[in-house]
Image: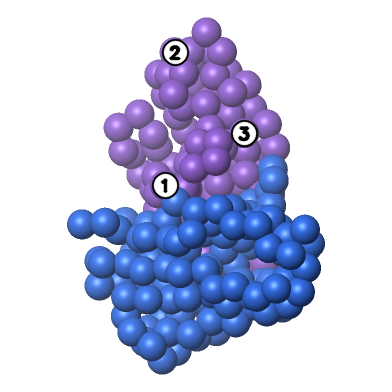
Amino acid sequence: GQSLEQPSEVTAVEGAIVQINCTYQTSGFYGLSWYQQHDGGAPTFLSYNGLDGLEETGRFSSFLSRSDSYGYLLLQELQMKDSASYFCAVSQGGKLIFGQGTELSVKP
Amino acid sequence: NAGVTQTPKFRILKIGQSMTLQCTQDMNHNYMYWYRQDPGMGLKLIYYSVGAGITDKGEVPNGYNVSRSTTEDFPLRLELAAPSQTSVYFCASSYGVDREGGYTFGSGTRLTVV
């Protein structure tokens, strides 16, 4: 089986940095992905970590440590439009299994 | 390039009715998936397909059926609709699950069973 844990809610102010953690317990793990979903919308792909370490894409970075079964998404220079739900997902046997999501609220 | 297209966008069903949710993609992706998302929750995998003619169960397959006769289309069939199937359904596709680029999702079908 598999399970992922991430905080249900995070609040931060505009311009700040926020980190959303994700821990997982799964067999046959291949990689960790992150998706963003604005209220009512389709999830959109943010990043994928197939190897340990940091991946950077603009203001967003994602990190994976296989030995710790842990990853995080780092959002820098927060903007109001970053208010959304963020999901980590593990790749396993041809499919993605999603966590419950973290709702990020960015305040002025 | 339309990506992943789902129809209908909204639907109200009565208990016991059946319907098919349509999903088509024009990116020549081999992998296609159906997820459901209940309010405030994550996405749960219903069924997936790694290519035409191949389908497999996900986490919550009961009450649903799928087929994959072409690379482009992956319809989801609900038989004998129940209130527990009230949810938002997302179809997605990808070149492969363990590759850069991730999944491309459709805009969703909002289904209410009354």
Give the labeled residue for mark 3: A103
Category of crowding for the residue at label 1, using alpha-carbon neighbours closer than 10 angstroms: few (below 14), some (14–19), many (at least 20): some
Circles 2 and 1, Cβ within 8 Å, touching? The answer is no
Callout 3: helix, strand or loop?
A: strand
Give the labeled residue for mark 2: A15
Residue A51 in which image quadrant: bottom left
Give the labeled residue for mark 1: A44
Residue B47 location, x and y as percent?
A: 56, 76
Chain B: colour as depicted: blue
Chain for mark 2? A
Callout 2: helix, strand or loop?
A: loop
Q: Residue at x 38, y 88 (%)?
A: B69
**Quadrant occupied by the C terminus of chain B:** bottom right
Q: Is residue B42 left or right of residue B49?
A: right
Residue A24 in which image quadrant: bottom right
Residue B9 location, x and y as percent?
A: 50, 53
> Which amino acid type is shown beneath numbered disc 2?
Gly
Circles 3 and 1, Cβ within 8 Å, touching? The answer is no
Question: Whole-Å distance between the Cαs marked 2 and 1?
Answer: 22 Å
> Which amino acid type is shown beneath numbered disc 1?
Thr
Front residue of A96/B64: it is B64
- Dot placed on the residue nearer the N-terminal end, 2 or 1: 2
